[in-house]
Structure formats: C-alpha cells, structure tokens
Image: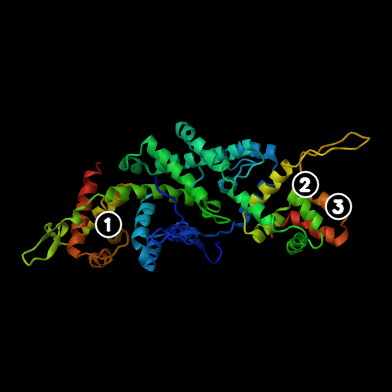
Amino acid sequence: MTTPHQTEISVLIEDFLHSNPNPSRQDWRALIEGNQPFSDQILDYAQAYQQSHSMSQEMDDELLDEALFNVTKSQAMALVSANNEPLNKVVAELARYKGPAARDLAASLGLAEHVSLLNQVIRGDVLAPYALLKRIALKLHVQIAAVAQTFSVNFQNQPVRAFKSAGKPALTNEPIAWAKAVQDAGIKGAEAERLIALEKALD
Amino acid sequence: MEKEGIEGQEVDQGEPEIIHKEYLRPHFQEIAFRDALRLNEVELLRSLKVKKHSDLGFVSTEILVTFARVGYGHSRKCKDQIALALNERIVKALGYFLRINSGWAYSFNVSSESKQEIVSTAWLGVMASKASISFAEVNFLTFIQARFLDWFISQTRLKNSAPSVDEYSAEDENGESLSMVEQVADENAKTPEQQAELKELVDKSQGGVLALPKKQRDAIYYHIECEYTQAVTAKHMGCTEKSVRTYLRLGLETLKKGIRK
C-alpha cells in the first residue's frame, strides 16, 4: 500500500491542479521546468494525469460496486470513529481559557462583555452561530467542525438536571437557538441586533 | 484560494517532509458547510440518504470529508453514516475512474484486491492532512483522482524497481562503460510519419504508456507530450540522443504489441 504522505511534491501538485483545473501540456511543462528538483516525480504524475480522463462529472448515476463497498466499509467507519485527535485538541485549547481568560476570549471573539453567552455555547446549551464557531476555530487553531462537535459532545455529556417545580418539568434535548439565548440574556437594542446578525454571517 | 504560507513539521532527515497546506472554502461551499453544521441528528441522517447532488438536502462530498476528518456526528450512528456515505462516494469515484480509463484496469491488472487497496489508500489520504481545511475539502474530485493516480504511479515504480536494461553495461574497446541501451543499434531520427504514429499510439494507449519502463515512458513524455527535440529530451534525461531514439523505438514497439504482463 502506498503511504499517503502529504509531501512537498503532493502539495505542489495539488496546488497546481487547484489553480489549473484543466492543465494543458504547456502548464505541465512549465511546472516541470520550474521545479527541477522534483521534475522526476512531477513527470510521473504529469504522465498519469494526462493519460487519464478528467473526473469532472458528477457520479450520481455511477453504479455502486456493492462488493467493494462492503469490504471497505469497516475500515471507513473505524477511521472516522477512532479519530478523536481534533476534538482532544479543541478541549485542550479551551481549557486554557478559564476564569478571567474566558472574558478575554469572549471579547476577542466579538462577544464584548457577554462571557456568559460564550460559556453557554461551550457547554453546548446554545447553538453557536457559524461565524462564532469560525472565530473560535481561528483563535484556537483548530477545525470549525471539531469546535462544533466538541460543544455537541459537551451538551450530551451534561448530567440530567433535577427540577424543583410545581409545574411539569421540561427537559431540553436540543440546544437553544442563538437568538433566543441573546434575548434571554437581556441584551437589547443595537447590541442584540449585532449579536443576532452573527447567525447569518460567514465572517 | 489558498492561504499564503505552508505549515510544515520536520521529520527525520531522509523522510519526506510532511506538509499541511491550508485552503479556503469557496463562498458557495462555505454556505453549504454552515447550513450542514446547523442540522440536528435526524436532519443530518436524512440528508446523508440523499444520493443525487441535484436533490434537496444533498451533502457535498467536500463536507463529508470535513466531517470524517474531525469525527463529526451527533452520535455514533451519525458518524458511521457519514463514513459510509463517504465510502460510497469513494467507491463510486473509483468505479467511474476505471470506467472512463478502461485501458488502465487492463494494463495494471486491477483485481478486486487492488481496488480495495486503492480505496484504502484514498481513505488514508483523506485522513492524512492536519490542515484546518485540506485540499480534499475544497476540491474532492481532483483530490480523489490524484489519490487514484498515486496508486497507479506506485505500481509503475514497483514495476520499474526491478533492474532495468539501463543498469547493465559493458566496456567498449577503450575501456569506457557503455549501457546496454547504448549498444543497441541506432536508428535514424524518426520520420514525421513515425512521429505521428507514436503520438497516435500514446493517445490511444489509455494508460499503456504508464506500464512502460520508466526511461521509455519519460522519453515518450518529453518528446511527444512536451514536444521537445530529441536533443533537449536527452538533456532532461541525462543520456545521449542515441539512447533517446532507442527508448522511443522500444516504447513504440511495446505499445504496438500491446502491454503484456
């Protein structure tokens, strides 16, 4: 089996294909000539690429090789479910922002003094808007989906709360919406609008 | 689309340097990604069942890669379904690749075990990058094609790792070493008809060229694909023009006969 190293050469080729989705012979030639130390490997790749037909079409109608799918599915599931590293990284990074540091984090994320909103998001009680997830990911140098997953896991891992209520207790099995959390926090006016606008922002 | 700068980490000297290039999602992909993150478990499971990209709720393969790379999913069931959906796309992509490049399967004798190995290689490729956003997350089709090609290239290297005729040499009357290729009788430079014939053969060979010994393959690539003269080809390959002509002739003969294992 080939080892899938993300090497300088594979990055060089991926980058090249990213900016030249349909490279011509001249493009390949320029790549080879401009990267003499790797010319031999690029040459191998250029030959293979030019000999193959481009996979530029959608494969909706492609018949599934059921036998191949079945023999490869356990590896696929194992690779995905055993992959805890990105989440562990998020947890470790978040652990650095306890107490006063959490205030600084909230401020740096554009939440101003609303650290309680950030705490609710981290606990998973509140569904974080995409822009906030992205800001957290950038701040912590982690993946956005890993941040979302961490908050989701935090929500699932919360102990079931006890209720002292005359009425019927209601358990929330879903995080509450960001806009509602902003409202519940008593934030009003332009500040509320600014925070709620994060829901649609891509940043 | 890509950010400036490459995040790299050093490895032992002699090992290939592992690099995690960062990419940025195009705007339309980012909107789709944002929307996918908003799906709850039931909605996500429902979306994963949508098979056609034109149908409502379809989750793009780039997003599946993102989810797989971080082990995203509201539950174990969700993670498994993400893995299965991505596996299905990879298996389909391989089927499509082999169908549109039908000559390759023949030239490389692609068995069911080989296909399994190719899928496995592709999966490891998906999970290998440590970048926040990897190439597979912005351009899956090109990425997966590159991983399939990796496998075929590795097969040609394996083939070419056996001692080639270039390794054998003899001494001439002056005591200088001559490669076996140098000793093959030279033929004059190709006529335009032969040149055209070789070009046509290369175009029709559907991967057959890749099954040729490396020197022949390189000579054909430089001379036919890059349209270098034999002199420039010789310079690139570090051999004589006579050797280039020999490699081209041997390549042409092999392509004519068809690649036989």
Residue beneath label 1, please?
B220
> Which three-letter amino acid code belongs to the residue tagged 1?
Ile
| Percent position of residue B153, x then y | 36, 50
Q: Which residue is mark 2?
A: A125
Residue name at image x 65 percent, y 54 percent? A92
* Residue B219 can be seen in this image: yes
Q: Which residue is mark 3?
A: A183
x%, y% of residue A99? 77, 59
Mark 3 Cα-neighbour bin, 10 Å: few <14, some 14–19, many ≥20: few
**Between residues B108 and B95, which one lies in front from this camera angle?**
B108
Where residue A150 appears, as percent x and y from the top left, is 67, 48
The amino acid on which the numbered mark 3 sits, given as a three-letter code, is: Gln
Instruction: Give the Cα distance between marks 1 and 2.
Output: 63 Å
Chain of the residue displaying label 3: A
Who is closer to the viewer here, B91 or A117? A117
- Left or right? Give the position of A63 relative to A149: left
Establish if B55 lies above or below A101.
above
Q: Position of residue B110 (x, y in %)?
A: 35, 39
Question: Is A174 in front, or is B3?
Answer: A174
